């Protein structure tokens, strides 16, 4: 378990991370959300020991993460960090060696991963010859090659096309199922919603939301009702149960305070015409965030 | 420790295989071969010049016969002065020497060549001088012995009274060794210092640093890198020395004296030993500084700029050392030999030239080693903080920021 207790980081007068307390369970995927400058990368750097926190405690399985543990930790930095002039295989072998993996062990692994990402031909190419998306694949391989127990991914999906995002997501899910604890940051809410059991949303260095995804949504209370109908749904806007009304192409989207309000809406629709769809939905993270912070996320 | 060697061998292998390294090494080796065999090379190229180096002589007896016999390439020219000049211009002769006798009976020479750039007149002038002296002596009825007595140089021997002072011969030898070592040290420190700074900045600009720093401690990383480059330097110098030695051995046997000439046949091993010691310490001092400076900037283009102050220091140290060759006991030399950034050059020169008391040597070595450790300590901290900084600010601000980033609280 990765535990952060009242962690604060100040750069001079600027507070990058303010009193952050988190518990990241083992063998789970934990999402770290926040806009640029929210303090995600700084938090990761503190967890990795690249920066020392100004205050608070960080521990992993009751110990500090130091260089003695570096073979258990994998890290994918936000920016590509590879030797541009080095060949892919040499590079991966070297970085794996630094994480305590012998060449004889890393070479077959490299082959496996390159095949998996459908780029076996890049093995003897220089990094600078690859496209950004393919560099990101290599970067990802370098983070997971040595089979870490804790994997920290800083914006792993940024700059990738949808096909590659899927490929990477699959790999991440597989690693989680194999027992790796994964912490990843993103500024795309939908990635976190899709992949993570638990999450933390950072805003200006402070955690705004934190906990189990389902709990967060449940405790938020508000629900969305999506209605697709043949007739005009405008009258619903007048209902006092409806906090928010949004017209959609097929019908409307109403936000209600609680589940039983949906029942009222359902009854109001009776006899007015043909209703093709009536769904009670969980609110999206984005909506929760906007609600909590009082401003738009991006 | 294991990771230390991983980085060390990676740094070393990567550099040894690089085109830049191979090209500079091969070029330098070629230069060394040419330098050591310079005589052979020159002879080869001036081979056909030898033939037309004959000098036409127009003179009266008995000067004419003396000249032709003692001047190499001298030939008596059958014809007038104008014809002689024509012959020089047409390339038949290299020069024309016309000797007239003055009223006093002494010879007077006119030397005609195509261009005045030719230096072939030196020998002719010397031979003619000899002839002139002989004629003059004869005129004054001086015997051969008297003449020898006048012209032989005075006996003059210098002896140093201070114990341990070097003899004239030793001093010359030492000067050559010190000079060579200074040059080697100067180039090595500048060259490898630059390589280290660039290497660090490259890793930073490619952001691979963040991964490296999260795997291996910056201190290990920095010193592994410095040692790796040191090994690279040793490889290069071992090659240079080997090829240099081979080159000298290969050179014409009469040129074998080149070794003796520079005093390398029987070197003062004490001086060589100190040279190696100061070389290594000097390298580590400047290499640590270079790694530290390199970690402060994030673009390779800026690396050059950041190491400039260090390069200046090395140049100053070098010139101090050169002036120490002539005045090893001057006050400013003694003082600067204790300033750690100058010690490797200046103290070493002092030790090569005069007998420096043991405590002085130990003191300067102590200061030097202390500075290296201190720099290593500060450098590692700046390195640790510096590698996470990507801004572009002044050097001093960067140093402050880097120290702040790495601060333990």
Image: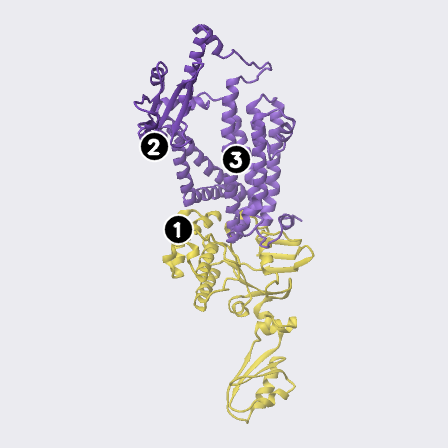
Chain colours: A yellow, B purple
Give the class, few, some or many, for how many residues have Cα within 10 Å of label 2's Cα (few <14, many ≥20): some
From the viewer's side, name the closer residue of A278 and A114: A114
- Kindly indicate the quadrant of the structure image that contains residue A32: bottom right
Q: Is residue A142 above or below residue B270?
A: below
Where is mark 3, residue-wise? B186
Label 1 vs label 3: CA separation?
42 Å
Callout 2 and callout 1 share a chain: no
Query: SS of the residue at dot 2?
Result: helix
Where is mark 1, residue-wise? A107
From the top left corner, tell me how far across and down residue B212 is, in percent: 52, 49
From the top left corner, tell me how far across and down residue A207 is, in percent: 64, 64
Question: Which chain contains the residue that carries disc 1?
Answer: A
Callout 3 and callout 2 share a chain: yes
Give the class, few, some or many, for how many residues have Cα within 10 Å of label 1's Cα (few <14, many ≥20): some
Please give the label number shown on residue B89: 2
From the top left corner, tell me how far across and down residue A172 is, in percent: 47, 62
Residue at position x 57%, y 32% from top?
B344
């Amino acid at each position: 378990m990765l535990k952060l207790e009242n962690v604060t980081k100040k750069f001079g007068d600027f507070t990058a991370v303010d009193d952050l307390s988190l518990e990241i369970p083992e063998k789970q995927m934990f999402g770290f959300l926040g806009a640029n400058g929210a303090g995600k990368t700084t938090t990761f750097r503190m967890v990795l020991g690249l920066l020392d926190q100004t205050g608070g405690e960080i521990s992993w399985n009751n110990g500090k993460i130091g260089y003695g543990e570096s073979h258990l930790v994998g890290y994918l930095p936000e920016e590509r960090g590879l030797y541009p002039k080095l060949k892919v295989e040499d590079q991966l072998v070297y970085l794996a060696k630094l994480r305590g993996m012998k060449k004889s062990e890393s070479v077959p692994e490299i082959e496996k991963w390159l095949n998996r990402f459908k780029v076996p031909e890049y093995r003897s190419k220089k990094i600078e010859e690859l496209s950004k998306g393919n560099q990101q694949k290599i970067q990802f391989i370098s983070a997971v090659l040595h089979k870490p127990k804790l994997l920290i991914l800083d914006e792993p999906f940024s700059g990738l096309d949808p096909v590659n995002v899927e490929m990477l997501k699959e790999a991440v899910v597989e690693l989680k199922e194999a027992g790796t604890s994964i912490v990843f940051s993103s500024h795309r809410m939908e990635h976190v919603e899709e992949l993570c059991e638990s999450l933390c949303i950072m805003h200006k260095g402070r955690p705004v939301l934190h906990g189990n995804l389902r709990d967060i949504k449940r405790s938020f209370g508000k629900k969305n009702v999506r209605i697709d109908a043949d007739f005009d749904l405008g009258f619903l806007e007048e209902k006092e149960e409806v906090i928010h009304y949004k017209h959609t192409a097929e019908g409307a989207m109403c936000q209600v305070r609680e589940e039983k309000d949906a029942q009222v809406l359902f009854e109001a629709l009776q006899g007015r015409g043909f209703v093709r769809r009536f769904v009670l939905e969980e609110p999206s993270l984005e909506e929760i965030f906007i609600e909590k912070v009082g401003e738009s996320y991006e | 420790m294991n990771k230390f060697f991983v980085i060390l061998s990676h740094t070393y292998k990567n550099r040894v295989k690089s085109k830049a390294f191979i090209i500079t090494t091969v070029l330098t080796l070629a230069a060394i071969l040419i330098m050591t065999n310079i005589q052979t090379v020159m002879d080869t190229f001036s081979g056909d010049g030898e033939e037309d180096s004959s000098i036409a002589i127009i003179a009266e007896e008995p000067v004419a016969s003396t000249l032709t016999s003692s001047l190499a390439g001298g030939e008596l020219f059958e014809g007038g002065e104008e014809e002689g000049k024509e012959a020089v211009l047409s390339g038949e002769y290299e020069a024309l020497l016309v000797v007239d006798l003055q009223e006093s009976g002494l010879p007077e020479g006119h030397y005609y060549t195509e261009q005045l750039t030719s230096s072939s007149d030196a020998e002719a002038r010397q031979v003619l001088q000899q002839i002139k002296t002989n004629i003059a002596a004869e005129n004054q009825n001086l015997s051969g012995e008297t003449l020898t007595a006048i012209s032989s140089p005075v006996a003059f021997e210098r002896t140093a009274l201070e114990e341990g002072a070097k003899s004239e011969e030793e001093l010359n030898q030492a000067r050559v060794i010190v000079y060579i070592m200074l040059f080697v040290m100067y180039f090595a420190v500048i060259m490898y210092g630059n390589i280290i700074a660039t290497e660090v900045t490259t890793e930073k600009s490619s952001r691979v640093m963040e991964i490296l720093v999260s795997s291996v401690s910056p201190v290990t990383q920095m010193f592994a890198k410095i040692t790796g480059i040191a090994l690279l330097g040793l490889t290069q110098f071992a090659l240079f020395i080997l090829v240099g030695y081979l080159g000298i051995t290969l050179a014409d046997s009469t040129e074998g004296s080149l070794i003796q000439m520079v005093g390398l046949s029987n070197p003062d091993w004490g001086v060589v030993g100190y040279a190696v010691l100061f070389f290594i310490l000097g390298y580590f001092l400047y290499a640590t500084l270079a790694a530290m400076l390199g970690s402060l900037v994030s673009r390779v283009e800026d690396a050059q700029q950041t190491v400039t102050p260090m390069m200046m220091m090395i140049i100053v140290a070098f010139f101090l050392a050169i002036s120490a060759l002539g005045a090893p006991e001057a006050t400013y030399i003694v003082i600067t030999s204790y300033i750690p950034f100058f010690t490797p050059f200046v103290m070493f020169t002092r030790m090569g030239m005069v007998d420096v008391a043991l405590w002085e040597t130990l003191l300067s070595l102590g200061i030097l080693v202390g500075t290296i450790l201190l720099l290593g300590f500060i450098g590692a901290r700046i390195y640790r903080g510096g590698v996470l900084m990507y801004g572009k600010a002044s050097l001093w601000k960067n140093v402050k920021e880097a120290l702040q980033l790495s601060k333990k609280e």
